[in-house]
Amino acid sequence: MALSYWLMKTEPGAYSFDDLLREQSTEWDGVRNYQARNNMREMSRGDLVLIYHSIGPKEIVGVARVSNEAHQDSTTDDTRWECVDIEPVTAFKEPVNLATIKDDDQLTEIALVRHSRLSVAPLRPAEFKHLLSLGKTKLK
C-alpha cells in the first residue's frame, strides 16, 4: 500500500512539535471539524505528516508518522469524534513559513493555502517532497 501524506496544524502553546519530540507519541485529539475528522479516518499506519504551527511564526516545523489509525477521541464520549496517534520522525532543518508557501508556484493548490481553516489536510506526494526540500530536510 502506498504512503499518503498529510499536514496537521497545531497551536504551539497548546501542543508543539517539541512536545511531540519529548513525548515520542501523542493522540491527535480535540479535532472538531468533520472534514478534518474524515481526513484522519483516511490515514493509515505509516503515513507521513507535516506539522504546522498555526500561531506565532506560522510555519511547518517537522515530520511525524501515523502510528495508530482512527479510533475514538479520548477527550469526548461523543462517538462522532475520532483521532489518530502520531510519533515524531524529524524536525525540519529550516522551518518553512506561510509566506514562503503562499509565494511558491508549486504549492498553490495545497489546503493550507486554499482551505486555511482546515486543521488536518491531505498533501500530494510532490507537494510533500517539495516542502521537505524547502525545509532542507531529508528522510532516511
Image (spheres, helix red, strand yellow):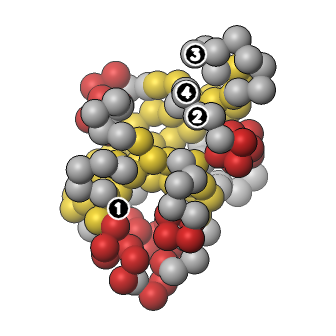
Q: Amino acid at mark 3?
A: Thr
Q: Which residue is mark 4?
A: 29
Q: Amino acid at mark 1?
A: Lys
Q: Which residue is mark 3?
A: 75
Q: Which residue is mark 2?
A: 31
Task: Tell me how far mark 2 sits from mark 1, CA to CA.
Answer: 29 Å
For the point 77% across and 26% down, the residue is 80
Is 8 drawn above or below residue 88 in the view shown?
Answer: below
Q: Amino acid at mark 4?
A: Asp
Marked residue nearer the N-terminal end (4 or 3): 4
| Quadrant where the C terminus is found in the figure | bottom left
Marked residue nearer the N-terminal end (2 or 1): 2
Circle 2/circle 1 CB separation < 8 Å:
no
Looking at the image, can residue 40 be seen?
A: no
Circle 2/circle 3 CB separation < 8 Å:
no
State the mark number for residue 138. 1
Q: Position of residue 81 (x, y in %)?
A: 70, 27
State the mark number for residue 54. none
Q: Position of residue 51 (x, y in %)?
A: 41, 48
Task: Tell me how far mark 2 sits from mark 3, CA to CA.
Answer: 10 Å
Q: Quadrant of residue 123?
A: bottom right
Circle 4/circle 3 CB separation < 8 Å:
yes
Circle 4/circle 1 CB separation < 8 Å:
no
Q: Residues within 10 Å of mark 1 (few under 14, many from 20)?
A: few
For the point 30% across and 48% down, the residue is 55
Q: Residues within 10 Å of mark 2 (few under 14, many from 20)?
A: some
Q: Position of residue 60 (x, y in %)?
A: 35, 57
Marked residue nearer the N-terminal end (2 or 3): 2
Task: Tell me how far mark 4 sits from mark 2, CA to CA.
Answer: 6 Å
Circle 4/circle 2 CB separation < 8 Å:
yes
Q: Secondary structure at mark 3?
A: loop
